[in-house]
Image (cartoon, helix red, strand yellow):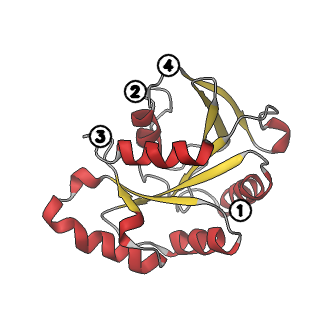
Amino acid sequence: MKIISAEFIKAAVDERGWPKDKLPQVAFAGRSNVGKSALINSLVNRRGLVRTSSTPGKTREINFFLVNGAFYFVDLPGFGFARVPGKVQESWGEMIEKYLLESPRLNLIVFLLDIRHRPGNNDMIMNRWLVENSLPAAYVATKADKIARGARNGYINAISGGLGVSAESIIQFSSVTGEGKDRLWETIKKSIA
């Protein structure tokens, strides 16, 4: 996809802050430190659009980015970061759940998992919740450049088996090399068409 523009629009903690227009939205969800910011920046060819941090758990609101004036990328707070107090994690959970269930414009959830790790408890809970609520999801294994191509099948099979999704449906992605970018864009374009 040709990116003409990508801009931060707003951060919201509840539905009063969600955009009121009728443009489609694509949300990005995953554990803290899974590479969400780097992936979004890579997709829109902009280094600093979404701020990356060396401290996981920094995103505390739902951030809306308008792409090409036509649709939104929605950056959800990362889940599962231990140093964030339990009460804060709870409020994030409620905020994310409300958005995913009630946003009338949500077309796709891009669920990110680190290719190097088996799905953790929070990943399994999130996936089960997505399935139970019949929410449209695309599965992306980030940081693919960290694993040699010949060794990746074992890692992808571990993610696939842990989540109960087909290995073929998991998009291997690297924000460093651009691998998987075209395939993910195709998935996004279909969802917002």
Between 30 and 191, the one nearer to me in the picture:
191
Earlier residue among tags 4 and 1? 4
Q: Is residue 83 above or below residue 69?
A: below
Quarter of the image containing the N terminus?
top left
Which residue corresponds to the image point at 43% horizontal and 47% vertical from the top-left? 184
Q: Determine the CA span between mark 2 and mark 4.
A: 15 Å
Taking the image as shown, residue 175 lies to the left or right of residue 29, namely left
Earlier residue among tags 3 and 1? 1
Quadrant of res 47:
top left
Q: Secondary structure at mark 3?
A: loop
Earlier residue among tags 3 and 2? 2
From the viewer's perspective, is the residue at label 4 or at label 3 nearer?
A: 4
Give the residue pinned by disc 1.
Answer: 90
Taking the image as shown, residue 101 lies to the left or right of residue 39, namely right
From the viewer's perspective, is the residue at label 1 or at label 2 nearer?
A: 2
The type of residue carrying mark 4 is: Ile
Between 1 and 122, the one nearer to me in the picture:
1
Q: Is residue 7 above or below residue 102?
A: above
Give the residue pinned by disc 2.
Answer: 47
